[in-house]
Amino acid sequence: MSLKERIYDMESASPVPPIESERSTPAAGTRLAVMSVPKAGALVGGVYRVLAPIGYGAMGTVLLAEDETLGRKVAIKFIRAGPLDSGFRERFTMEARAMARVSHPNVLQIHAFGDHEAAPYFVMEFVPGVTLEGWMETHQPLDVDRGLQLMGRICAGVAAIHAAETVHRDIKPSNILVGADDHPWVADLGLATFARLVRGANHQVVGTPAYMAPEVAFPIESDMGFSERADVYSLACIAYEMVTGSAPFDAEGNTAMMLQHAVEPVKPPSSVRPGLPVALDEALLHGLEKNTLERTPSVTAFGAALEAARAGIRKPARILVIDDNDDFRESLAAGLAGAFPGAEIECVRDGREALEAFDRKRPSLIILDLDLPDLHGMQLTREIRKRDPGAAIPIIVVTGSGGPKEWALLSAMGVDRLLVKPVSLDDVIALVHRLMTERSKSSVPPRMNGETLTD
């Protein structure tokens, strides 16, 4: 059955399958287990003194407690009252085992497992922090470099989960905790299971639609061996939301949300938040590929792509220099190569060559003169911005003449800086460093309020 046929079948022939992470009430007539959560002051397992409730979820209640033996605070998760035949106990045990299989500083650690008055529980490390969901709400617009550094640590935690042959299956901002110094912990492995079990089992729709990979909602036979890539997709959704301030898709209801993830194209992040680098667009869109075969193959690879984009924010990977003065062009290229080791420096002498070089491979920074043969710098700038409407690529104009009038025109076209010759090479390099740093922290391409820089 094709994707369109599966979607039609879902819309017209049957309701959306229950989403496991959002189930909150049992079916009518189902017998319930009566389980009481310990009150403040109760002693659990002869060791843990309950202090207060600190969280509630679809499967359980989390309590803050004091480990009276080791003198530390811990978090205790109790299964909530639920259907006796729903598999809640089995899933609760699987969550504890999934957490126990992983030992990593970015994954919440488990200390103990047991029963208290017939109610199963497990004890976890206590993290004094907030969920990533709350963290993002209080840090918008986000410093992109800071956000990508945080995402790198989250990816490291999920990679450790995968290394333990476990798939999380419900990665979302509310299932990630953030503490001091932006230290994250991946938590809530209630839907996690062995990767080999996912591959061999009958398909079950589990997760949260806003962060759910298309193959989870609309499975096909060839997708069943790529369960780890569904976690990659969820991480890409989070990273997209983190750096742009909005999720990849916005819809009302589970069905509409899953359909958008399955069929709607994703807007490039730089079109939502102008100024984001091309490398970040590529990393996120690759992680959000709808076809699992074309998606970033692993969490480790996705984290590496984000780190490369992060490095590119602070250091240009490819610089295009456009100037018809041979001496100035060559000395500038030599200085840039020394200041940015590993960066690709391409030099051209006129506007037509510049557009050909741009179309052949997009640069991460452009330095151009206005007085060019064949195509004037003003016209060249317009053509570049037609190819880069989000102004993701910084442009520095270094020219022999110019003032407030020229700067006003150039600024309106998306030029970041204007330098009037003669200029020192050190000043140009320092400006490139400063500009790339500003780009990593700004939600829009930086401007200088009409200021013209002269030597």
Image: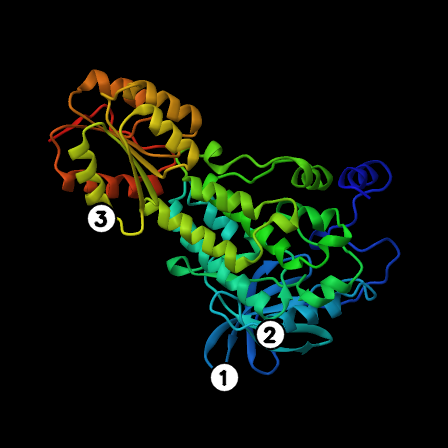
**CB contact under 8 Å: marks 2 and 3:** no
Residue at image coords 37%, 45%: 143
Residue under pointer 1: 69
Mark 1 vs mark 3: give the one in front: 3
- SS at badge 1: loop
The residue most toward the top is 405
Which of the two residues, 353 or 438, is positioned nearer the viewer here? 353
**CB contact under 8 Å: marks 1 and 3:** no
Q: Earlier in the sequence, mark 2 or mark 3?
A: 2
Residue under pointer 2: 101
- SS at badge 3: helix
x and y percentages locating residue 178 in the rendered image: 46, 57
Residue type marked 2: Arg
Residue under pointer 3: 339
Q: Earlier in the sequence, mark 1 or mark 2?
A: 1
> Does residue 126 appear left or right of residue 94 in this picture?
left
Distance (Cα) linking label 1 and label 3: 56 Å
Q: Which mark is residue 128?
A: none
Residue at image coords 67%, 57%: 226
Which of the two residues, 18 or 331, is positioned nearer the viewer here? 331
Q: Residues within 10 Å of mark 1 (few under 14, many from 20)?
A: few
